Image (spheres, helix red, strand yellow):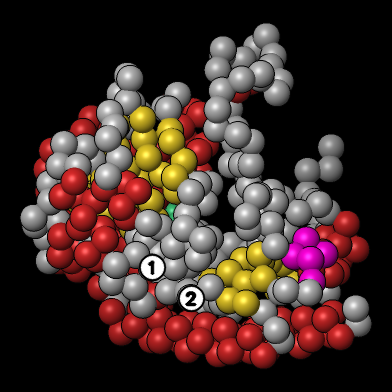
Amino acid sequence: MASQSAPSRGADVAQRPEGSPAAAPAQSGQSASTHPYWSDHVGDLAPYTPGEQPRVEGLLKLNTNEHPYGPSPRALEAIRAAAGDALRLYPDYDSVALRQAVAALHGIDPAQVFPGNGSDEVLAHIFDGLFRKAGRVLLMPDISYSFYKTYCRLYRIDCELIPLAEDFSIRAADYADHGGPLAGIIFANPNAPTGMEMSQADIESILRAHPDIPVVVDEAYVDFGARSAVPLLARYPNLLLVRTLSKSRALAGMRVGYALGSAELVEGLRRIKDSFNSYPLDRLAQAAAVAAIEDREHFEQGLRAVIQARDDLVRSLAALGFEVLPSRANFVFARHPAHDAARLAAALREQRILVRYFKMPRIEQFLRISVGTPADCERLCNVLADILGAH
Ligand SMILES: *Cc1c(COP(=O)(O)O)cnc(C)c1O
């Protein structure tokens, strides 16, 4: 059996259909498929579709918001140092060194830090451990990180989708004024895939309105120029923040994320984790994460480069006639008044450039484009200019 798959050619990537997000409605209903081998709920799941990772030569990947530059050299060194005989031993189940490094980074107590195998796993434990409450609904924006809907299906959580405002911002009053009964609230700040930031005052209004339920703010992209809600942790025991090392620390391949919150929230998550997998972070990941967090210079240098490239990209896209939402992330969300987004994405794909396209109401004319190096952005804009000019 040929188990080795050769890297596919450009022609293949051009023909492959674009992965769409978990666009299936969150409401329960008819199961798409099932099998007698499966548990009862498996047919009803709406699995998340990750951005593709094709192995194609010369491919420009601007579809999954990875960092365009490598991780800290100190992180790579730490991985090499950890790759030894000690791997026969289980890792620290409590990730003490990592929790200390994270706590020092944010100026909080290590007991307020809950690490996991990527923030996706942390989010899964949050949905399982904090939002499964009979007779209550979880509030989230209709347009946000699509994994949230997937977890609602998996854990059978009733959710109410709150539409974004006309300008694609999250309207805090819709959450603060909601009568409930609520299980919790979750949104991303900056939001995905819009990249737009919510103000600290707005976040605080939601926290104040709902002191009895967890309010979870996914700060996956906050390092790229938005204001973090970390200072609010001291005053709001209902606030839980989620962070990842995948985006701003260029470690998507190591799978490290964490939550920050009060001891009560963290204890709830720890009970779930130790009922699921006591060792979510392996030795290499823990070592890499500590070193990456401690290398602030490399981190800040990478941020400056991405932010500069983003601001240049926004100007270039605007010059091509695109409308670009105000981004505080390492991606931009843009639409062209005269060109269909699905066709643009397909035309880019033919030129071996991948961007993310979501076939969803209200945003089906947008492209989400990750910020690459200045050379990446230039290649993208040159190809776009050709495509736009040819139609
Ligand atoms: C990328 C992303 C995540 C997942 O991050 P991992 O730590 O790589 O699992 C979570 N939330 C949002 C909004 C993201 O964009």
* Ligand 1 under 8 Å from disc 1 Cβ: no
Q: Dots 2 and 1: beta carbons under 8 Å?
A: yes
Can residue 109 be seen here? The reply is: no
Determine which residue is flagged by label 2. Answer: 326
The answer to whether residue 269 is left or right of residue 24 is: left
Q: Residue 152's x, y, as percent? A: 46, 32
Query: To which quarter of the image does residue 214 belong?
Result: top left
Q: In the rendered image of this protein, does residue 150 appear above or below residue 105?
A: above
Residue at disc 2, CB closer than 8 Å to ligand 1:
no
Compute the Cα span from label 2 to label 1.
8 Å
Q: Can residue 178 be seen in this snapshot?
A: yes
Q: Is residue 59 magenta?
A: no
Residue in the image at 71% along x and 74% along y: 336
- Which mark, residue 180? none
User: Disc 1 marks which residue?
Assistant: 197
Regarding mark 2 in the picture, which secondary structure is present there?
Answer: loop
Q: Secondary structure at mark 1?
A: loop
Amino acid marked by disc 1: Glu
The tag earlier along the polypeptide, 2 or 1, is 1
Q: Position of residue 97 (x, y in %)?
A: 19, 57
Of the pair 277 and 64, the residue shown nearer to us: 64
What range is drawn magenta here? 339-343
Question: Which quadrant of the picture is home to ligand 1?
Answer: bottom left
Chief secondary structure of the magenta portion: helix
Residues packed near mark 1 inside 10 Å, few (<14), some (14 to 19) or many (20 plus) = many
Residue projecting furthest to the top: 36
At 83% from the left and 81% from the top, the residue drawn is 388
Q: Residue 231's x, y, as percent?
A: 15, 65
Give the left or right position of residue 301, taking residue 308 as reference: left
The amino acid sitting under disc 2 is Pro
Going 14% across and 56% down the picture, which residue do you hit? 233
Is 9 above or below relative to 118? below
